[in-house]
Amino acid sequence: MHIVHVFIRVKEDRVEEFKTATVENARSSLQEPGVARFDLIQQDDDQTRFTLVEVYRTLEDAARHKETGHYKHWNESVGPMMEEPRTRIIYRNVFPDESGWG
């Protein structure tokens, strides 16, 4: 599995707009055969901070995701909403093993 956590800080006046756009992107992403999970979480003590938890079956699936129309639309539309450039950390799963990701 190829697991990516994307850390995002959004402008305070764009939080709701960002959530709407990102939920739409997440729903579309879950329709991709190579996507095992695509979660959007919001930091409790700072409502402008979000994390995307993306789990792809392969590195190639992650690359294909970035070629989809819904990702390109999301990327273009949320760029102006961000307070700072997003960052990411890549992980690999330990438990559950790949069969446990559904």
Image: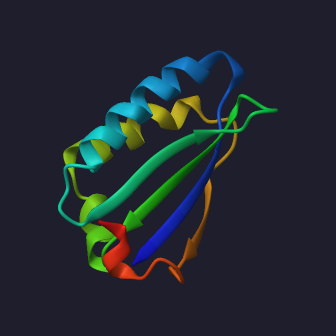
Q: Quadrant of residue 66?
A: bottom left
The vertical placement of 16 against 90, above or below, is above
Q: Position of residue 26 (x, y in %)?
A: 36, 42
In the rendered structure, the answer to whether residue 44 lies left or right of residue 87 reads right
Number of numbered discs on residues: 0
- The single residue placed furthest to the right in the displayed view is 45
Q: Position of residue 33 (x, y in %)?
A: 17, 62
Q: Residue at x 51, y 38 (%)?
A: 79
Q: Quadrant of residue 32?
A: bottom left
Dividing the image into 4 quarters, which one contains the C terminus? bottom left
Dividing the image into 4 quarters, which one contains the N terminus? bottom left
Q: Residue at x 71, y 21 (%)?
A: 12
In the rendered structure, the answer to whether residue 50 lies left or right of residue 56 reads right
Q: Position of residue 54 (x, y in %)?
A: 44, 59
Q: Position of residue 37 (x, y in %)?
A: 38, 57
Q: Residue at x 40, y 43 (%)?
A: 75
The vertical placement of 102 against 37, above or below, is below
Q: Quadrant of residue 13?
A: top right
The vertical placement of 15 against 89, above or below, is above
Q: Residue at x 58, y 41 (%)?
A: 41
